[in-house]
Image (cartoon, grey):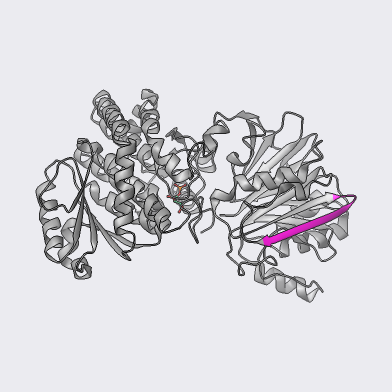
Amino acid sequence: MCGIFGYIGGRTDAGPLVIEGLKNLEYRGYDSWGIACKRNGAIIVHKDAGKISGVDSSAFAEPCSMAIAHTRWATHGNVSARNAHPHISGDGTIAVVHNGIIENYQELRAELETRGHAFQSETDTEIIPHLIEEEYRRTADFAGAVRAACRHFQGRYGLLALHADSSTLVAARTGSPLIIGVMNDGGYCIASDIPAFLEQTHTVQYLDDGEMLVTDGKSILFTDIVTGEEHPKREIPITWSPEEAQKGEYEHYMLKEIMEQKESIVRAVNQDEQQIRILADAIRNAKGTFLVGCGTAGKACMAAEYFFSVIAKHHVNFAPASEFKLYHHFLEPESLLIVVSQSGETADVLEAMHIAKSKGSNVLAITNVQGSTISREADFTLLINAGPERAVASTKALTGQMAVLMLIAYALTGKLQDGKTKLLETGAAINDMLNPRYIKRIEALAKRINQNENLYIIGKSWNYPMALESAIKIQEVSYIHAEGFAGGELKHGPIALIEDGTPCIALLGNDEVTADMLSNAIELKARGGRIIGIAPQEHSVFDEWLKVPEAGPAQPIVNIIPVQILAYYLAVTRGKDPDMPRNLAKSVTVK
Ligand code: G6P
């Protein structure tokens, strides 16, 4: 989703600095980009459709100490340089970059038009500099004008604004994240995501919802947008290293992050045991526990329903965060909401949290990003410690989320140590599995099936959510039509889709549902399906077998990994860039 990067301070290379910062935000997904620099009392804007990766930042090297930049993921208005940010005021003195959606922009735009404003783009954002311009004309106070403009907005925004006549940079936020990197030389970077400025600083401050900030590059003032009341902030150290956020020896982040699961699962398991017990106690004492998440994180929640049922004999409910709105009828002050989110910024998850909080329920968060909005708003947060995840296709965050949820299920039965041992054994087995020969075998398989336009995946019990997750992985990076089903549901419709040679992946363990799953695989084969078994043992029904370690309840954690690798190679061998999937964003901060 859109990325913001701004700089103000003593350095004179603000142009190249923000361009390189934007490149660090590419992984969020975008289709156009732009930059505004303040130089000699004027705002100079450059925008373009397409990618920024090939842009030479030295083209922006003319001295400047204040710049804002943006990668746009189109929502209102098509992909074009005209619709790209920054947008400027009618008189050209104010430049704004914005993430989020101003929901009442049509009404505001119509009002501005009646007062003589003319617009260049189809975006909701363009009304922002125009409104600031009007307010500034009245008061000649830039920060005050931004504050006054914000009072008109309905919807979500994280915005940065520059004025040709002001030596300050102003930011405001309601809904869309903005994080301040405190530079060692006293300047500030302001970005929508921490990895954007990890090469510059490891000290951050968070702008919270309903707050704005004004900085001249030497000092910074945080205030409430509405009341103007000052909000003092702490400086918080960040533990991620810039190297962790780089591709290193790998061609793509996706493969790097898949391979990192050798260590990230172990980091997820080596949690502070006391924290795991706090979560288990909260579930035990709650009058109803709901798990919510979106996309891949939602599949971790679904798997957890099985973990809690089988391991802890305890019922929890999963709902995709986007579907949670009507569950508030079931919520009571004693209910518990557990939100699972890699980024900790997903808009639908935040909305579910707000619903639960409005009912007085407790909210616990399982996330990967320390200091994210979700972690700051939750009553209690557990980090999965996967390290920065930059590929749009979530991989190591999923296995970390499942590992943590499984640990909690064990803790609920008083057998946390058993769970830890089981998961650490699984981590070691994954380490052995992820060897070059195994990866090569999957690459070869991808080459054999990459011309198929349809692919189906089946699973049962905790492998059912993994069948759904497999479909997401394959769809999002290879664009092959992939669908996941519960094995037992095949006969009720999906089996009609199977034709001669259709690749069908069957996810199996070695457990009480294996026999049922084998029957389902045989049914597929009888209709022409080519069966790719992902299982600890070989079975005669398999046309191809990808061996995985036997892992008991941790089987879904193990089984999804070969599918992640397959999805990666399906993308690469079809000539697609798995790190830049079309139409998708890493962090979905709009609804
Ligand atoms: C986007 C990403 C997915 C992710 C989902 C939820 O759709 O592309 O990979 O699973 O958002 O994100 P979250 O950060 O809340 O886990």
Q: Is residue 356 above or below residue 494?
A: above
Q: Main secondary structure of the magenta part?
A: strand
Q: Is residue 18 above or below residue 121?
A: above
Viewer-proximal residue among 20 and 164: 20
Magenta residues, as a range?
A: 39-48
Is 562 displayed left or right of 244 in the figure? left
Task: Tell whether position 46 is magenta.
Answer: yes
Is 108 displayed left or right of 369 in the figure? right
Q: Position of residue 178 (x, y in %)?
A: 63, 45
Q: Position of residue 353 (x, y in %)?
A: 46, 47
The residue that appears at 23% across and 64% down in the rendered structure is 502
Residue 12 lies in what quarter of the image? top right
Whether residue 572 is visible? yes
The residue that appears at 37% across and 55% down in the rendered structure is 570
Is 414 displayed left or right of 92 in the figure? left
Is 546 displayed left or right of 134 in the figure? left
Q: Is residue 434 above or below residue 57?
A: above
Viewer-proximal residue among 555 and 180: 555
Q: Position of residue 335 (x, y in %)?
A: 36, 43
The residue that appears at 34% across and 48% down in the rendered structure is 443
Viewer-proximal residue among 563 and 372: 563
Q: Position of residue 125 (x, y in %)?
A: 68, 62
Q: Is residue 362 above or below residue 326?
A: above
